[in-house]
Amino acid sequence: MAAAHHPTESARAAAQGACRALGGSFAAVSVWERQLGRLRVLVNVGDLADGEQEYPDDESYPVHQFPEIVGFLHERWAGGGEPEAWVETADGPHEQGSYCHQRVAALRRRGRGSCVVAPIVLHGRAWGELYVARPRGTPVFGRDDAHFATVLAAVAAAGLAQTERLAEARKLAFTDALTGLANRRAVDVLLDEALDRHRVEGTVVSLVICDLNGLKRVNDTQGHAAGDRLLERFGSVLSLCGAILPGALAARLGGDEFCLVADGPPADEVVRVATELCRRAGALDLGEGVAVGVASTGDPIGPVRSARRLFRLADAAQYRAKGTRSPGPVVAGRDGGEGDPVVRMADAAERDPVAPKGERRRFRRR
């Protein structure tokens, strides 16, 4: 790994070494793309099953299909220490508390008998996972193997950290440092590209803006470390919900404001995910839920010729959700089309530079 010059080279060396050390027949290293809410396979090594490639073009799995990713990588080790590896078998859970579902189905489908999954942690944050499998008819992995895989994942993390520094400059340019989600610059780039396609092909582009309630209270009463923890946890919830929408981008715009950008899914599907986001945010231990506004070219909001207008519409909807303490999302254009009060508010703020203070402060930074 020390000789690698690119993260995929480093990942391949890690997978090969772990496969040999654990007596496996197959290994993979995957990265958690938090802003897209998916686990993407970087490399597969060993005995590949039908359809598997050494360097997959796009082998990825939405995080919502693998609840252990969020459970193990956020809740079980949030209090400190390193997350431990766990074992799955094709015959079902090997140890109490392990997960079956998608992983067990994959083992059976590919003719494998067991696997050990070890979270990879870089800089104190979940980065991805190391996965090693054995074929059917061979001894299944045990507790000692899981402990050893935990150590191997830590070694792999050190090697990956070295090669990741080479790509760090570009990553920082488009990533929010606290949550690991995309930042405002990444949102602007994606929205401009998506709206170009919308104008040519008529694709649906949607923007969901979220304002996290209660952050100031948490900062004032429990300290900024607790506030940062709330932001990180909501970021994970946003990533989880965003994974339901193919190709959606989850981002932190700054402060307590987040967003989802969806390019392609129907407006109703985006609203359904926004509703689920409100429900999950309301269940967080810290904070007081979230105010969510949605603007989509799939709704009657008039022509959207720029990202600026879509931002204004989603922001106005979010401002209305906050003002009315709405438990669910407010959607621009669904209360009278272009006569919708949210649409009128957004367009008035665009036309009138001396709009009422309450209407202008939400849009000034746009």
Image (cartoon, rainbow, N blue to C red):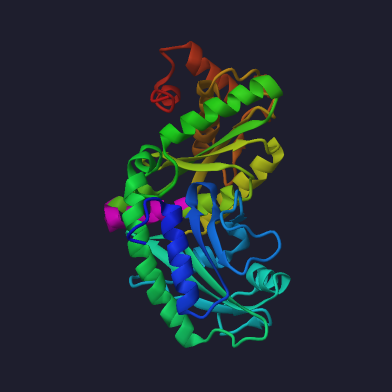
Residue 322 image position (x, y, % from top left): 49, 38
Name the residue nearer the viewer: 310 or 25: 25
Instruction: Tell me: residue 230, above or below residue 316.
Output: below
Question: In this view of the protein, can residue 74 be seen by the observer?
Answer: no
Is 361 one of the magenta-colored residues?
Answer: no
Residue 95 picture quarter: bottom right
Residue 248 image position (x, y, % from top left): 58, 42
Q: Main secondary structure of the magenta part?
A: helix
Residue 84 image position (x, y, % from top left): 43, 75
Residue 134 picture quarter: bottom right
View extreme (front): residue? 3
Q: Is residue 80 left or right of residue 333?
A: left
Instruction: Tell me: residue 330, above or below residue 359.
Output: below
Is 233 one of the magenta-colored residues?
Answer: yes
Q: Residue at x 44, y 76 (%)?
A: 149
Name the residue nearer the viewer: 33 or 306: 33
Q: Which residues are magenta?
A: 220-235
Q: Residue at x 42, y 53 (%)?
A: 7
Instruction: Tell me: residue 142, above or below residue 154.
Output: below
Q: Quadrant of the C terminus?
A: top left
Question: In this view of the protein, can residue 154 be seen by the observer?
Answer: yes
